[in-house]
Amino acid sequence: MRARFWFTVATIGAAVGLLGWGAFVTSIDAGLAVPDWPTSFDSYDPFNPWPNWWEVTPILAEHGHRLAGALVGFLTLILAVWTGLTDPRRWMRRLGYAALVLVSFQGLLGGLRVVWVSLDLAVIHACTAQIFFAVLAAMAYFTSDR
């Protein structure tokens, strides 16, 4: 359980970075710098969607937020499967599955916010991020030695 605790803490660290990155995207008004979803500039290549995209701050911010979100989603998938396979507590397994559902919902909300150009979805996206963070924090607490 100690390894899973530290993996959860690492996932929280990545999620905190993602939350901060999302705040940066919002503060520089870059949420629509990449105008399409699920592609980026009609490209499925996550690392080269636009020539020199890393040199344009709004595009770097928005596309980087998408890449960071994918990383957090992948870490959460691993955490949910690991918890589901190894934790004897049913409620803890459900917490892991809830984290996976929330992070998936986050990705969907972020994408739909771009497609529908909806400020309401942006607010829901931000609020859901905090709920996701709270679920991860609970998972860390309940896997710690306390």
Image (cartoon, rainbow, N blue to C red):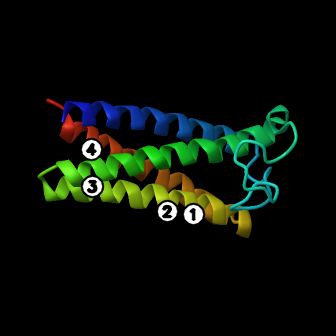
Which residue is identified by label 1?
A: 108
Give the mark, 4 or 2, whose residue is nearer the N terminus: 2
Give the amino acid at mark 2.
Answer: Phe
Instruction: Give the Cα distance between marks 4 and 2.
Output: 19 Å
The residue shown at (28%, 47%) is: 82
Q: Residues within 10 Å of mark 2 (few under 14, many from 20)?
A: some
Residues at badges 3 and 4 in contact (C-beta under 8 Å)?
yes
Instruction: Give the Cα distance between marks 1 and 4.
Output: 23 Å
Quadrant location, the N terminus: top left
Q: Which mark is residue 139?
A: 4
Q: Which mark is residue 105?
A: 2
Instruction: Give the Cα distance between marks 3 and 1.
Output: 20 Å
Q: Is residue 135 left or right of residue 36?
A: left
Give the amino acid at mark 1.
Answer: Leu
Give the mark, 2 or 3, whose residue is nearer the N terminus: 3
Residues at badges 4 and 2 in contact (C-beta under 8 Å)?
no
Give the mark, 1 or 4, whose residue is nearer the N terminus: 1
Residue found farthest to the right: 51
Which residue is identified by label 3?
A: 95
Q: Is residue 61 left or right of residue 102?
A: right
Residues at badges 2 and 1 in contact (C-beta under 8 Å)?
yes
Above or below, 55 against 29 in this view is above
Q: Position of residue 53 (x, y in %)?
A: 82, 39
